[in-house]
Image (spheres, helix red, strand yellow):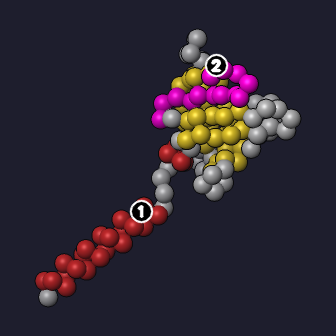
Amino acid sequence: MMVKKKSWIMSLMLATALFLTACGGTAESKITGIWKLDYDDEEPTFLEIGEEQIISRKPSNDEPMIASYIFTETQSDNFILEAINPEDGSKVFLLEGYMDGKDRIAVVDAPGEPAT
């Protein structure tokens, strides 16, 4: 009887671990990586989002822009990305969006033209 109880507990723990793994991480952990910003008529910009910094690169520009950022989750399951200006420490709004699948960020609000 003790063996059945132990195997039942182990099965329950394994199922819980698999469920939590399948649910994925937070939106903040999901945005870590390299993203391509597509604007209508402009050259694409690539954002490399790390744990502490955003690096913005354009193929025609040799010097990337590097800034720390603030990630904020909203109550409506969106998130807001703000960069910290390295010169004066002010916050610069980058975008508000949400994860649309695992490889796309749907932008709800951004300065200037809408992006995907």
Q: Amino acid at mark 1?
A: Leu
Q: Is residue 103 visible?
A: yes
Q: Nearer the viewer, residue 29 or 108?
A: 29
Residue 52: in magenta span: yes
Horizontal and vertical percent position of residue 96: 67, 39
> Relative to 61, does residue 28 appear above or below in the rendering?
below
Residue picked out by circle 2: 63
- Residue drawn 80% across and 37% down? 39
Quadrant in the rendering for residue 114? top right
Residue at figure coordinates x 76%, y 30% from the top left: 111
| Identity of the residue furthest to the top in this view | 87
* Residues drawn in magenta: 51-64
Residue at x 49% of width, y 45% of height: 29
Q: Secondary structure at mark 1?
A: helix
N-terminal-most mark, 2 or 1: 1
Residue annotated with mark 1: 20
Q: Is residue 63 above or below residue 20?
A: above
Residue extending farthest to the bottom is 1
Say left or right for 58 vs 22: right
Measure the alpha-carbon separation of dots 2 and 1: 41 Å
- Locate residue 58, reporting x and y percent: 70, 28
Q: How many marks?
A: 2
Q: Residue sitting at 53 percent across and 41 percent down?
A: 32
Depth check: 27 or 116 in front? Answer: 116
Dominant SS type (magenta):
loop
Looking at the rendered structure, the secondary structure element under dot 2 is: loop
Q: Is residue 10 left or right of residue 16?
A: left
Question: What's the residue type where badge 2 is placed?
Answer: Glu
The C terminus, quarter of image: top right
How many neighbours does mark 2 have within 10 angstroms: few (below 14), some (14-19), or many (20 or more)? few
Quadrant where the image shows the N terminus: bottom left
Toward which corner of the image does residue 63 lie, by quadrant? top right
